[in-house]
Image (cartoon, rainbow, N blue to C red):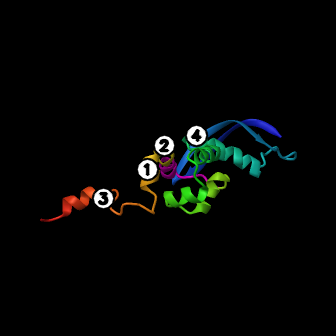
Amino acid sequence: MTTASYDAELRHDGRLYSFTIPHLDAPVCQACGEKVFTERVDDQINAALRSHLHLLTPEEIRTALERIRMTQKGAADRLGIAEATLSRWLNETQIQSRAMDNWLRVFFAFPQVRAALDRRGQDPDLGIADMIEHCRVD
């Protein structure tokens, strides 16, 4: 094992990001000295990408769900995503897009948003009511 600075270039959300991981712990090949990229190393790189992009971590998402007392299924339903997608974010097998990260932050921050997205009582004119009024002809 070695700990060294590592310059990473990763594509996320259709963009290429360059950033430095100051202390990457990685195994090194005894024969050639090359770093060996294991699942543990990938996890460190993904965590560094999240940090670089200021995205919510799986733990932050989990904590927010607990704070608003919502299950993964309930949150996924209201967010309009598959429960499996939310599960992949929580299990660190996928990193959410910046757009979904923004959506999560708004969802967690505002009870009014969560209430408005409850499909059981959702107003079908939510978000377009002013357009409907504007387009009506007397």
Task: Specify the segment rendered in magenta.
Answer: 94-104
Q: Are marks 2 and 4 in contact (CB under 8 Å)?
A: no
Q: Is residue 37 visible?
A: no
Q: Given this view, does label 2 or label 4 mark the residue nearer the observer?
A: 2
Given residues 95 and 38, the one toward you in this image is 95
Residue 76 percent location from the top left of the image? 55, 58
Q: Position of residue 55 (x, y in %)?
A: 56, 44
Q: Which mark is residue 52?
A: 4
In this view of the protein, which residue sits in the foreground, 95 or 102? Answer: 102
Image side of residue 32 versus residue 41, left or right: right
Q: Position of residue 66 (x, y in %)?
A: 61, 46
Query: On the image, numbered disc 1 is attached to which residue?
Result: 113
> How many numbered marks does the figure carry?
4
Q: Earlier in the sequence, mark 1 or mark 4?
A: 4
Q: CA distance from mark 1 to mark 4?
A: 28 Å
Q: Name which of mark 3 and mark 2 comes first in the sequence.
A: 2
Disc 1 and disc 4 in contact, CB within 8 angstroms: no
Q: Is residue 131 magenta?
A: no
Say which residue appears at 58% left-offset and 40% top-offset.
52
**Which part of the image, by quadrant, shows the C terminus?**
bottom left
What type is the residue that disc 3 sits on? Ile
Label 2 to label 4, Cα distance in Å? Answer: 22 Å
Labels 1 and 2 touching (C-beta < 8 A):
yes
Q: Which residue is mark 3?
A: 128
The image quarter in which residue 132 lies = bottom left
Res 109 label: 2
Q: Within 10 Å of the Cα at label 1, are there few (<14), some (14-19), or many (20+) other Cα atoms? A: some
